[in-house]
Amino acid sequence: MNILAELLTNEPKYRLKQIQKAWFDLSVNNYEEITTLPVELREKLKNLPWLAVKMHKILKSKIDSTEKALLELSDGELIETVLMSRESLKENKGSSEWPVEERHTICVSSQVGCAMNCVFCATGKVGFKRNLTTEEIVDQFRFWQRRLNGRISNIVVMGQGEPLLNYDNLKNALNIILNNTEIGPTKITVSTCGIPEQMDKLLTDKDFPQVCWAISLHSAIEQTRKKIMPVHRKDFLKFLVDWSQRYHKLIPSRTHFIGLEYLMLAGVNDNEKHLKALEKLANKIPRVKINLIPYNDTNSQGLSKTSQEMIEYWHDYLMKAGFVCTIRHSQGQDIAAACGQLCNNFNYD
Ligand code: SF4
């Protein structure tokens, strides 16, 4: 039990809800300022840290507006989280003018390190240390919310760790954010390398929020996927097709897509055979979106980037075949904030 839970042991349940609401109120900066709580309780809570994460270092990209923060946890462990900002046109009903608004997406971590050891990923090289607590996940959101002094538009749980191996804390954290902010479930995407029993569990778990899912696929050929992702289980691709159909049956909403993340590695998963295998698999998954990801260097031996021409050829082919397909624009490469690059030891000085 954490300290806050212990201090609330004899309090009515709604006190925790009042506290969680205050966490997201930018005018409140400590427990003493939560005026909805009785004075005695505020006194009891006053020495608790207001955030479970502390900024250790921050880096700003020189080539785009990405920021990466190295955050320190109460036991001294470090995690990374990323902010990506872009301008987009704002809907302006009844007017011919389209004002520009800035949209902010944050990438949050779910574990300290990761046990999955995907060959392209710097976090995997660090190994697994521990799961993040509910508060440590929530507070990556609060950290950016306070730094921006405003609204976060999207959350991607694609930082360090395999989210489904920290199931309960992830679920609680997402529910706290959804219950206390304007973010809706389709603005949250959780990425998993595919843990079948946890994927099954969330389909029958009524408390798990109906967020969007991105599956780290990286190959639609079992043997190749196993080489890239040691966690790959036999027959996972068959399972994925079945799971996707059950997911869409459960959530028939048109805004819920299944994302297939495909990191393109030269000579590993990018020839015609792989393209046809991806097309065949994607054809069996309803409402699928394919996201082609150029490889970002993580000093992994022997891996290199597929040529831009080849990535575009795949993109055009898949679009012509009728799929929604995008090429991910990697942000924050100069500060090692892009896909697979988070490892806590980038030179922050
Ligand atoms: S890609 Fe994700 S699941 Fe794989 S090692 Fe990296 S953090 Fe872990």
Image (cartoon, helix red, strand yellow):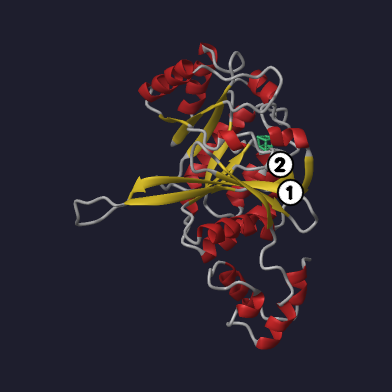
The three-letter amino acid code for the residue at tag 2 is Asn
Q: Could you tell me which residue is drawn at 63 percent across and 26 percent down?
A: 297
Q: Nearer the viewer, residue 293 or 216?
A: 293
Q: Is residue 322 above or below residue 151?
A: above
Q: How many marks?
A: 2
Q: Residue 29 versus residue 12: which sits nearer the camera?
A: 29
- Residue 180 image offset from top left, x and y in percent: 53, 66
- Residue 274 pos. (x, y %): 54, 16
Quickly name the residue at label 2: 344
* Residue lying at the far front of the rendered structure: 349
Q: Disc 2 and disc 1: Cα gap in Å?
A: 7 Å
Q: Which mark is residue 78?
A: 1
Mark yes or no: residue 338 visible: no
Q: Could you tell me if the residues under marks 2 and 1 are in contact, i.e. CB atoms within 8 Å?
A: yes
Q: Quick one: 28 or 266, which is closer to the camera?
A: 28
Tell me what residue is drawn at x 62 percent, y 58 percent: 138
Residue 69 drawn at (x, y percent): 63, 48
Looking at the image, residue 185 lies above or below residue 243: below
Left or right: residue 167 compared with residue 154? right
Residue at point 77%, 37% (across, down): 126
Q: Quadrant of residue 174?
A: bottom right
Residue 96 pos. (x, y %) = 19, 51
Within 10 angstroms of label 1, few (less than 14), some, or many (20 or more) residues?
Answer: some
